[in-house]
Image: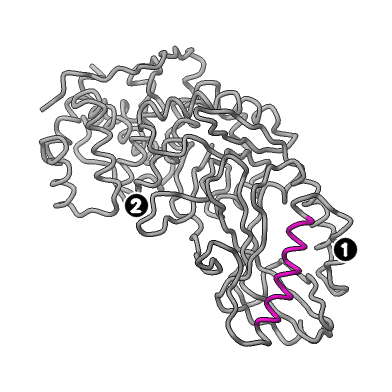
Amino acid sequence: MPAEDQSPSPTPRRRVRRWEWAGLAGLAVAVTLVLALTAFDRAGHDRDGRHGAAPIGNPYEDGRRAGAQALLDAWAQAVRTGDTTALPALFDPGATPGFLDAEIRRAGNAADVPFSEFGYEIAEDPEVPVPSVVVDQLGASDVWAPTVYLRYAIDGADAQPTRKPVSVLLARHGDDWALVSDSQMPGSERETWRGPWDFGPVEVRRVGGADGRSSVVLGHPEQSAMVDVLATELADAVAHVTDVWGEDWARRAVVMVAGSQEEFAALVGSGHSGSDIAAVAISDAIEPGSDTVSGQRIVFSPAAASRLTDVTRVAVLRHELTHVAARSATEDGSPMWMLEGYADYVGYRGLEATFEQLAPTLAATVAESGPPASLPRDEDFRAGGDVARLAYESSWSVAAFVAATYGESSLDALYRDLASGPVTGVELDARIRAVLGTSAEGLVQSWGTWVKQQLS
């Protein structure tokens, strides 16, 4: 039964100036969500919480691992502290050309990043085979390409560290191990993850929040204006999302501003070039039974500063923060119309805008073909162009319809029920009926009627 409370926004409504709508109309395809981009691997964590591969009981292998781990620890310490004078002694004479120079630059770039953890660990995964020609060229007593992860956390903003893959090649001369390469080994799929500090000097803005929770915005000097404005808006955006979602999330975030398409792809995955996306929310995979999430990041593309207006930037930030807030309650494969529609609803909530301004593609489609008769399909969101725009705008309008008709609490309940993973048509119908008291078909019919009314 529809709720009488229409759940008006408790936050001040923000009037959008006419010139800003050109950017806002395209927001639907300017934001995206990547769930479980990087698998969180527990290998290498022993039961008392320490990091690094556990001894395997073979004296030779244990000594090998201990020596290599000591090298990795020294490498991490030098980079984290910006000790560029310590780095040359860690590199093999046959190291890949440019590797040492890159690490010296990296150490300088990372000097201002407030790491609470930064270290390399050898995992228990199988090592990467080293081609014999590489072994022969190095003339070392041992050449090894173990599975290694960079484990890092941003102080105050990360409740736990994230782990990123590193493709590393090590060589031993006598008792001493040295770094040879962090490039992909021929024949191996393992690559080295690159962070903002791999792409230039990093500027940091710390943003205070409620209960001492701090967020962090990272970018480069060339993006300082974007970094500054995001830092100014972040606390209000966190509070806005909390007003809708509730307090059962970290209520803090790490926001990164990429300086190039190469950096954007490195941070969020090669499937996103950054040329047609304003921002992406990413995270590590969630361990079964866990309610905490590591590696949550909101990454703005290099095109975002020029493409977004004051209003669309705020909407995008709220949208991505909604994905961050809801991540622990969201399973991969859940219906995209629910995930993206809810995030857009939170992003737009409180803006004084007409339906046509928020959903121009949907409005045009209704004028030509009549109201929607089905929910958007997952593949529509990835289609690009007007198909994706229609999917996003339709999804937003479904969420707005549910909030207006049944109340915001029902929208929240519907999200939490439908975000639990893939559903069959029968399951979708049952879950919608349990929350809203109507079938999926009834929801679509009522939503279509409501959309038509908004445009009349």
Q: Amino acid at mark 2?
A: Glu
Residue holding disc 2:
331
* Residue 103 within the segment the image draws in magenta: no
Which residue occupies 13% across, 41% down? 434
Q: Is residue 85 above or below residue 307?
A: below
258 sits to left or right of 251: right
The quadrant of the image that shows the C terminus is top left
Question: Which of these two is toward me, 450 or 14?
Answer: 14
What span is colored magenta in the figure? 62-78
| Disc sitting over residue 88 in the figure | 1
Residue 89: image quadrant is: bottom right
Image point 81% across, 47% down: which residue? 108
Disc 1 from disc 2: Cα separation: 45 Å
Mainly helix, strand or loop, the magenta region? helix
N-term-proximal mark, 1 vs 2? 1
| Lateral position of residue 173 relative to residue 456, left or right | right
**Which quadrant of the structure image shows residue 255?**
top right
Check disc 1 and give the amino acid type.
Pro
Horizontal side of 227 relative to 432 (left or right) equals: right
Q: Nearer the viewer, residue 130 or 149?
A: 149
Question: Residue 296, percent across and down?
Answer: 51, 46
* Position in image of residue 54 (x %, y %): 58, 74
Q: Secondary structure at mark 1?
A: helix
Which quadrant is home to the N terminus? top left
Task: Name the outermost residue toward the front.
Answer: 48
Q: Nearer the viewer, mark 1 or mark 2?
A: 1
Crowd around label 2: few <14 · some 14–19 · many ≥20 (10 Å): some
CA neighbours of label 1 inside 10 A, class few (<14), some (14 to 19), many (20+): some
What secondary structure is marked by label 2?
loop
133 or 274, nearer to the observer: 133
